[in-house]
Image: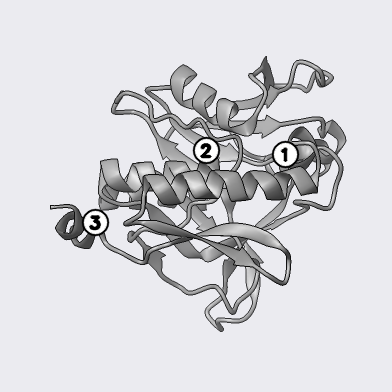
């Protein structure tokens, strides 16, 4: 099954080469890096590099508009490994990238959804050997997006928490999203320079954006999400309601 691999990256060329690109060394699919005009990257063999608009929300919109008609695998620029929960329910092993992603696309097609993702937390406490098609958070770090039906691309105006917005939009339009609860990522998110935190002006401004954009989402989708504060970390986040599309339909009718 053919698909494009698209990596949005902001001022992290060294980290990208040390992590995500190493992970993709044996992948035989077209790879595209989207970079910011102020931070062009040096040429990399067999990898396309395209200047994209600034802001992660704008980048996600750009991908949907310019690659409509394709299957797209969006991957962050700081992924160390992608691991699957073993049968013991405790330990993890790296996935066979080509085989597992092929199976993920096939499962998404079977479930008739267009957006799929994996577990954000590399911790067996949060992982289960199940899939979910209820409303659940599809984090943009490693996301499959099927645009082969050429529908009008979904858009967001948010420059943070945009993946919550897209999750909800797909849930409403496609009657579900898909999450693989037994697969998770090891990343260097928040631990290295560059990336979205720097792009937004640092972690303090990112926290403020989380509150502002969280309020927008809560007001826009009151039946599907709510804003709460993680007191331990002094940061706001969105909680999605654990709901099927059929249950959602009953609420809005």
Color encoding of the figure: one colour
Report helix, strand or loop for mark 2.
strand
Frontmost of labels 1 and 2 is 1
Residue 220 in percent (x, y) is at: 38, 44
* Left or right, residue 219 beside residue 26: left
Residue 36 figure quarter: top right
Q: Position of residue 120 (x, y in %)?
A: 59, 60
Q: Earlier in the sequence, mark 1 or mark 3?
A: 1
Mark 1 surroundings: few (<14), some (14-19) or many (≥20) residues within 10 A: many
Q: CA distance from mark 2 to mark 3?
A: 24 Å
Dot 2 or dot 3: first in sequence order is 2
Image x and y of residue 219, in percent: 41, 48
Which residue is denoted by mark 1 in the rendering? 196
Residue 92 coordinates in the image, percent (x, y): 64, 71
User: Residue at position x 43%, y 38% from top?
Assistant: 145
Quarter-wise, where is residue 231 in the image?
bottom right
Judged from this view, the residue extending furthest toward the left is 253
Using the numbered discs, state the Cα–Cα distance from disc 1 to disc 2 in whole angstroms: 19 Å
Secondary element type, mark 1: helix
Give the Cα distance between marks 1 and 3.
Answer: 32 Å
| Residue 245 circle label | 3
Disc 2 target residue: 73
Q: The N terminus is located in which quarter? A: top left
Q: Nearer the viewer, mark 2 or mark 3?
A: 3
In terms of depth relative to the viewer, which is nearer, 228 or 86? 228
Placement of 223 over or under 7, stated as above or below: below
| Among numbered discs 1 and 2, the one appearing first in the sequence | 2
Q: Secondary structure at mark 3?
A: helix
Q: Please say whether residue 228 is visible from this viewpoint.
A: yes
Measured along the vertical axis of the image, is residue 49 above or below residue 178? Answer: above
* Res 140 visible: no
Residue at 30 percent across and 64 percent down: it is: 243
């Amino acid at each position: 099954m053919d698909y494009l691999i698209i990596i949005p990256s902001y001022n992290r060329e060294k980290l990208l080469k040390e992590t995500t690109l190493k992970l993709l060394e044996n992948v035989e699919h077209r790879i595209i890096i989207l970079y910011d005009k102020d931070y062009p990257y040096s040429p990399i063999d067999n990898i396309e590099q395209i200047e994209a608009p600034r802001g992660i929300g704008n980048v996600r919109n750009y991908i949907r508009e310019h690659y409509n008609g394709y299957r797209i695998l969006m991957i962050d620029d700081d992924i160390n490994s992608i691991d699957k929960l073993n049968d013991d329910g405790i330990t993890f092993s790296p996935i066979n990238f080509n085989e597992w992603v092929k199976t993920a696309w096939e499962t998404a097609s079977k479930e008739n959804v267009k957006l799929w993702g994996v577990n954000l937390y590399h911790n067996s406490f949060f992982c289960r050997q199940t899939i979910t098609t209820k409303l659940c958070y599809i984090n943009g770090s490693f996301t499959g997006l099927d645009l082969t039906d050429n529908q009008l691309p979904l858009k967001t105006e948010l420059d943070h928490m945009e993946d919550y917005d897209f999750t909800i939009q797909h849930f409403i339009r496609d009657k579900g999203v898909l999450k693989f609860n037994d697969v998770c990522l090891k990343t260097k998110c928040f631990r290295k320079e560059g990336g979205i935190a720097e792009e937004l002006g640092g972690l303090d401004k990112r926290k403020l954006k989380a509150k502002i954009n969280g309020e927008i989402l809560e007001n826009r989708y009151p039946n599907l999400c709510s804003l709460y504060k993680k007191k331990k970390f002094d940061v706001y986040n969105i909680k999605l309601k654990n709901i099927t599309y059929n249950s959602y339909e009953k609420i809005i009718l």
